[in-house]
Amino acid sequence: MEIEKNRQVETEEVISNKPAQIRILRPKKKNKDFQNGVGYLFVSPFIIGFFAFTIFPMLFSLYLSFTDYEMGGTATWVGLDNYIRMFTNDPLYLDALNVTFFYAGVAVPFRLVFSLLVALALNKVVEMVGFYRTMLYLPSVVGGSIAISIMWRQLFGNDGALNSLLAAVGLPTHSWLGDPNTAIWTLILLYGWQFGSSMLIFLAGLRNIPKMYYEASSIDGAGRLKQFFSITLPMLTPVILFNLIMQVINGFMAFTPSFVVTNGGPMNSTMLYVLYMYQRAFRYFDMGYASAMAWVMLVIIAIFTAIIFKSSPHWVHYESEK
Amino acid sequence: MFHLKKSLAFLLVMMMLALTACSGSSDTTGEPSGDSGKDSSKDSEDSVVTLRMSWWGSQSRHDQTKQIIDLFEKENPNIKIEPSFTGFDGYFDKMAAEAAGNNLPDIMQQNFGEYLNQYADKDLLEDLTPFVENGTINMDGVSDTVMQSGTQGGKLLGIPTGTNSLVAFYNQDMFDEAGVSAPADDWTWDDYAKASEEIAAATGKFGARLMEPKNLIEYFLRTQGYKMFNEDGTGLGYDDDQLLVDYFNMNKELVEKKAVPAYDVIQQIKGVEDELIARGDAAIDFRWSNQATAVTATIPDANIQMQVLPGPGNDKGMYLKPAMLWSIPKSSEHKEEAAKFINFFINNIEVYKIAGSDRGVPLKQEIRDELAPNLTETDKKVFDYITKVTENSSPIDDNYPAAASEVLDRLATIDEQVIYGQLSPEEGAKQFRQEAESILGN
């Protein structure tokens, strides 16, 4: 603001004064330019990156989504054909959409509830808090990685740890990844298991609730459960909103687990949206169509985020609103 | 306002600089990043060219290929080869991503059929005819039919690495244990089913591995005089869905009798060394002949034999195939050097001494003859087998459309659905025709 004001004064001076005096002012101005230049220089890596690796590819993919571009070929404008084909002439697309809605619909609440429970438990722990937090956060640090997915494949494999465990206690074993009914659940479990980041955010939220509320309510005779639903949960709603939005976006964009653990199988029962998009682009070289798929996913995520935001005044409580 | 313009101009200049820096570095991707000392002498005679080379394969192939690269580098000190390799799973995904980035390796292991056609269709591969004509790649004495398999639309897009064929591997020990006689040259599908059931019942393991639809439905159709795709690649090459129904029924029955495993077992297999036959868990498996070494690697004591696939009509069904092809992508900046390596691979006897039959049986008779006395037991069987198939086979079908890869993926999914019981064989055959026609018609 102040700089802006200064400049205005300067400009006025420039206009009102004679040329001779302008010359005197020039060094000052140059200095300002230089300062701004340095500023731009320092932010330029971000700005260049933002244009080169975000804005340009996005606009390019928007353009491609209206073409029949196949890798190595030329792009011919086909209008809305790709978008129409998705919903009328591609049964696999609708399957993938279905699987993804189911996956996000189950996995996101599962991860949120689970991470809240762990956060509540950690909030009570007094000794060795750092150790527990690190241990519980670890799956998320390595979570997106291929290594964890490969481990998951081994755990749930026919000769994997889970079946060995079941066999050891005399329970029937099962082909978890080979059965189309259970394969998606192993991926949901994997998603829930990587609860670390949302758990940490919950934990921070819990720490922020003033102790005096609990003290006051216990004097009034409120039990633990009553305290949880009347104090903890309402006070935590802003954090829940944040986590919910982040996880919904995350859930729709899941790729690695279905790619590595099951590769979409058996019978496409774990064919998540992004995996199918990837296959269209890199297996069948169908770049135009895959670009269109990406934009539809963007719209879907935008709609869900908007709905959550719109609904938030009804269930999110901010202390400052009182 | 004036100020804004200036800063915008500044920003633009910065972006230009960054962009030129980017394109500048991509010009030299042929050079290894850590080799700056050699970069400076780029223009001199003895500059080092770095080629990137990609292949898929088993662990034994990775080890062999690295030995071969060492040998080549020793003979050609001015060429350095940067290898990159994976299992077959994921190889073409990776190549497609590199193709999208216009960053394919200089030497690329390519596969006959749907893959070669896909890359040919997108015009991503260099025509190697000039290199053969000017002698950089010496193909003297290689038959036209073999060369034909690397040709698409009059362009030579791949140099075959060796000759390959489908083969029925069988574990003689398991046959003996069950008291079943070994498959004869004229064994039938009934013989195959009966042997599988009896061996499974006697050993408690599997008689055979569930057939892989992508290769074996085509073979099954060929034995009866049909092709997978029609001549111009616009539809399927057979009219009667009953053919596919028969195929589904045969496999489904064997799964139900527990003579072959269902997909819950198959899905766990990652790579050839992990196959049921390679672990002694199945007695019969239809695979490619160049996989013999990998199949026997984990159970060296087992008596693994090779036979042609079941008939009737197996002389019509069997065919010779280039095990794989070496291709040079159009985007390569060192095509001459890449061609030199391919020439080395095809013509140097040492290569085959290291690799055996892993990339197929050598194309040239003189190399085969020279190798013959020193072959391993397994390679000797493979050489003999290829000779036998050469006399009892029909030419390969090279009419795969560019979308074949998607059609074959659908076929694999429908095969799963039939085995899992979600579709009846009749429904499966019908649905495959529908989906295939929709894909090919697009």
Image: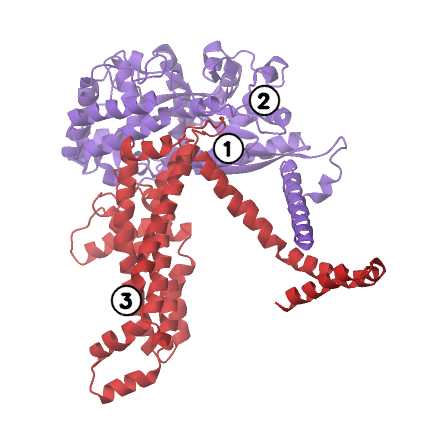
Chain colours: A red, B purple
Q: Residues within 10 Å of mark 1 (few under 14, many from 20)?
A: many
- Residue A37, placed above or below residue B279: below
Real-space CA distance between mark 2 and mark 1, rounded to the nearest whole angstrom = 24 Å
**Label 3 marks which chain's residue?**
A
Residue with the mark numbered 1: B99
Query: Which type of secondary structure does the marked residue at label 3 adopt?
Result: helix
Real-space CA distance between mark 1 and mark 3, rounded to the nearest whole angstrom = 49 Å
Real-space CA distance between mark 2 and mark 3, rounded to the nearest whole angstrom = 72 Å
Residue A214: mark: none
Residue with the mark numbered 2: B343
* Of B175 and B151, the residue lying toward us: B151
Residue with the mark numbered 3: A315
- Residue B91, placed above or below residue B365: below
Callout 1 amino acid:
Ala
The answer to whether residue B350 is left or right of residue B404 is right
Query: Which type of secondary structure does the marked residue at label 2 adopt?
Result: helix
Residue B28 drawn at (x, y percent): 65, 37
Residue B235 drawn at (x, y percent): 31, 17
* Of B225 and B207, the residue lying toward us: B225
